[in-house]
Amino acid sequence: MTTLFTDLDSYSEWRNSIPFGKTIGFVPTMGALHEGHLSLIRAASAQCDFVVVSIYVNDLQFGSANDFQHYPRTQTDDVNLCSTANVSVVFAPLKSQLFPNEIMTLLQPSNAADHFEGSDRPGHFAGVVTIVDRLFSVVKPTHAYFGIKDYQQVAVINHMSSQLHPDISIEICATEREPDGLALSSRNRFLSQRARTSAALLPKALTTAITNWKSGVMQSSALIDAVHSVLAQDPTIKVQYISIVQAGSMDQVQTVGSADVVIAAVVIDGVRLIDNMSFANA
Ligand code: AMP
């Protein structure tokens, strides 16, 4: 049975009732749950005694109020899904409980936040590390689960957590994809039928980089050009960035090795999509 807590005190009462030594796997989400979130929940359930899923649409990480307001909110369906996935607790707090002071101090993310999502969406990662730090302090998990789909987010959270929450084990899960390769995302529901079809060009373009690397192309610029050419098949796709970075550090590389990752962000019909693939999986 899944219990829904919307206030801190009742959650804390539950948390305090868990005997010392039991493991708590925490899956932070913004709701609108899909198979990607469920894969994190399954990983947590396989490893931990209890699973806590948070549902909190974090205004601090949105650039525009409009984007925040239009983010999908499907809490009843989400709680039902969590029940079928044997989640122990859904924690869906109000902002006023998490951040009771009107004047907020935001955490400063590490240098891994400087480019890509960090520069395209100013303030985004300060919002992400501030909420994850706060949720870690309240939820008090032993393990926390994140998707590698949000590659830069994982790097930034790893840095924050190793400094501020060294006892929490950060677990990284693979990206769940549609049959045509598109990474599952809560935002995919906003794609028109036409945009949904062209969205499959994003994983196809990243796969081309991996295939070309396997066949001996090592120069980052050549591989990035190949990604651009695939995306150019649909002129309505607006490329935000394509880069190849070193695993973990987010430093751009010139010559590509197996520890590196190709990352990209595009906008299709006003919907922003991000994805990445590792050369380690080639
Ligand atoms: P969100 O609700 O978008 O904030 O995502 C919550 C967590 O689910 C994050 O750790 C994401 O990286 C992860 N996630 C989102 N999409 C996927 C996916 N397609 N496969 C695996 N994990 C995902």
Image: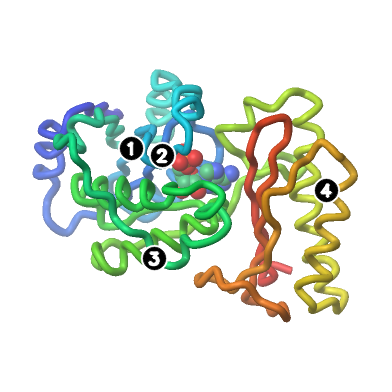
Image point (47%, 55%), residue name: 153
Q: Position of residue 167 (x, y in %)?
A: 24, 66
User: Which of marks 2 and 1 precedes in the sequence?
Assistant: 2
User: Which of marks 1 and 3 precedes in the sequence?
Assistant: 1
Task: Quote the CA–CA distance across marks 3 and 1.
Answer: 24 Å
Q: Nearer the viewer, mark 3 or mark 1?
A: 3
Secondary structure, mark 3, is loop
User: Which of marks 4 and 2 precedes in the sequence?
Assistant: 2
Per the rendering, the mark at residue 54 is: 1
Amino acid found under the numbered disc labelled 4:
Leu
Secondary structure, mark 2, is strand
Q: Position of residue 278 (x, y in %)?
A: 66, 65
Q: Is residue 36 above or below residue 249?
A: above
Q: Position of residue 30 (x, y in %)?
A: 42, 35
Question: Does the CB distance between marks 4 and 1 fall below 8 Å?
Answer: no
Instruction: Check disc 4: other Cα within 10 Å, few if <14, some if 14-19, many if 20+.
Output: many
User: Which of marks 3 and 4 precedes in the sequence?
Assistant: 3
Task: Quote the CA–CA distance across marks 2 and 4.
Answer: 29 Å
Question: Does the CB distance between marks 4 and 3 fall below 8 Å?
Answer: no
Question: What residue is shown with label 2?
Answer: 29
Instruction: Check disc 1: other Cα within 10 Å, few if <14, some if 14-19, many if 20+.
Output: many
Question: What residue is shown with label 4?
Answer: 231
* Placement of the C terminus among the 4 image quadrants: bottom right
Amino acid found under the numbered disc labelled 2:
Thr
Q: Is mark 2 within 8 Å of ligand 1?
A: yes
Q: How was this image coloured?
A: rainbow
Task: Quote the CA–CA distance across marks 4 and 3.
Answer: 31 Å
Question: Does the CB distance between marks 1 and 2 fall below 8 Å?
Answer: yes
Would you say residue 31 is visible in this rendering?
Answer: yes
Q: Is residue 267 above or below residue 202?
A: above
Task: Quote the CA–CA distance across marks 3 and 2.
Answer: 21 Å
Task: Quote the CA–CA distance across marks 4 and 1.
Answer: 35 Å
